[in-house]
Image (cartoon, rainbow, N blue to C red):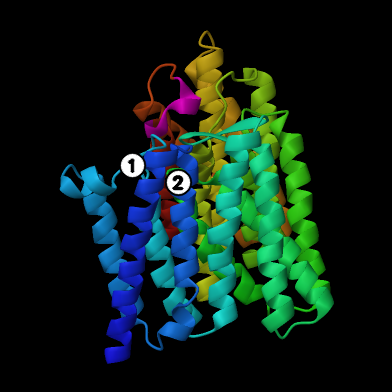
Amino acid sequence: MLHSWLGIVLVLALLLGVMAALKIHARRCAPHPEWTRKLLHMSMGLMTLSFPWLFTEAWPVLVLAVFSCAYFALLRAPGPLRRHLGGVLDGVGRDAPGEIYFALAIAILFVLARGDAVLFAIPVLLLTFADAVCALIGVRYGRLRYSVGDGEKSAEGSVAFFAVAFGCAHVPLLLWGQTGRAETLLIALTLALLMTFVEASSWRGLDNLFIPLGAFALLKNFLRMDATALCMHLSVALALVVFGLWVRRRTALDESAVLSAALIGYISWAVGGGRWLLPLLALFCGCILSSRRAGRNSRSVPVHGVLCVASASLMWLLLASALDAPQLFYPYTLALAAHLALTGIAALRHFHPWLRDGAIVAFCVLTSWLLLFVPFLLLQGLGAPALKQTLCALGFVALAALGFCTMQRGPQPIPTDATRWLRQAAVAAAVSVLSLVAL
């Protein structure tokens, strides 16, 4: 007990010392605010790497997380603490609580790792070095910019993230892991690629939460696989990137939305298999058709739009995996069909306001139903139960369309309207739940 409390005091003293040193450095040298912020993150990451050896129980890490979150929250509030130590975190002009997410992620990761130093250290290394180098390279050398939810990132920064993430995974696995050399190489490549998707799709500091927890889940799964399975995972991830870039030129998705869509496709395939990926591919084909008929939108669809579209389907996918309930493939497909119809309706109403609402709704409902439920019928077999579900799906998609049109009256600036995406997600989720109850 005494040893744990001494460790807590030591870590907190180091944190305060680092904050004070960075504040002095910022006053004397006036570096770019992003450098100061990332130096703090790297210092925090290096301190937390000692946790598996410093603490044998989870409660000291949880105590540190509570103290750290409270300290960073107070640092953002007006007062003497902000006057003396402020500027280290808020100099970049963003109010995202990334350092709070950082502390929460470390605490959750320590609990999940259960003393496994490799499972704890690799995600922390990714967050400590890959994320920091990505931001600093983007600030210094970034020229090829792409938009995210609250600003811009750079292709140069994403490439740097991938390179550093590969090293952060490969070296520890070679030195301390129990896997073979081929498996180590494949794990590092796949993990680095997928975490690059996560970093590029994150906004408002959420990468500090998503990167370590996502890396932990993937790494724990990859360590159980042989080289053949790992090759398949890497191939699918690469194929989805290529497909996403092809889709980018034909739809209104922006770059970060494309990468988040590729990540969602990978999750669907990894958790459910190929049949759960097929409806997502059909959804992309429908988006391409909708973009051609509606015209390319000058305001690209942001990443939060993709997450809203995928939210209900991911819920059904995870429930199906956890409960071993393959019948949930029906509401999964229905939610995607509803989203395709609603997206098409919103786009056509916005870009072709002279068309009748009835014609728009009928066309979008029928098109989305055919694109999603013809493959569904073939996958489920041409028996009476599948045929009944397919026919009922037409009514549920129409119900979602009518409900959405009632709530979303008149042409709207659809890509940047966050409320509209949330409304659409709620309608699709409600209809998918209703379909499960009704059938």
Question: In this orientation, does residue 200 appear?
Answer: no
Q: Is residue 6 left or right of residue 320?
A: left
Instruction: Give the residue displayed 61% in from the left and 61% down from the top.
Output: 385
Labels 2 and 1 touching (C-beta < 8 A): yes
Question: In this orientation, does residue 23 appear?
Answer: yes
Q: Nearer the viewer, residue 92 or 393?
A: 92
Tag 1 secondary structure: loop
Which residue range is magenta in the image?
413-419
Instruction: Give the residue displayed 52% in from the left and 64% down from the top.
Output: 212
Percent from the top left, x then y, of residue 154?
Answer: 63, 36
Reply above or below: 413 against 343: above
The secondary structure that most of the magenta stretch takes on is helix
- Residue at mark 1: 87
Percent from the top left, x then y, of residue 240?
Answer: 74, 49
Q: Is residue 317 left or right of residue 99?
A: right
Instruction: For marks 2 and 1, give the CA distance.
Output: 9 Å
Percent from the top left, x then y, of residue 357?
Answer: 48, 18
Tally of marks: 2
Tag 2 secondary structure: helix
- Residue at mark 2: 36
Amino acid, disc 2: Thr
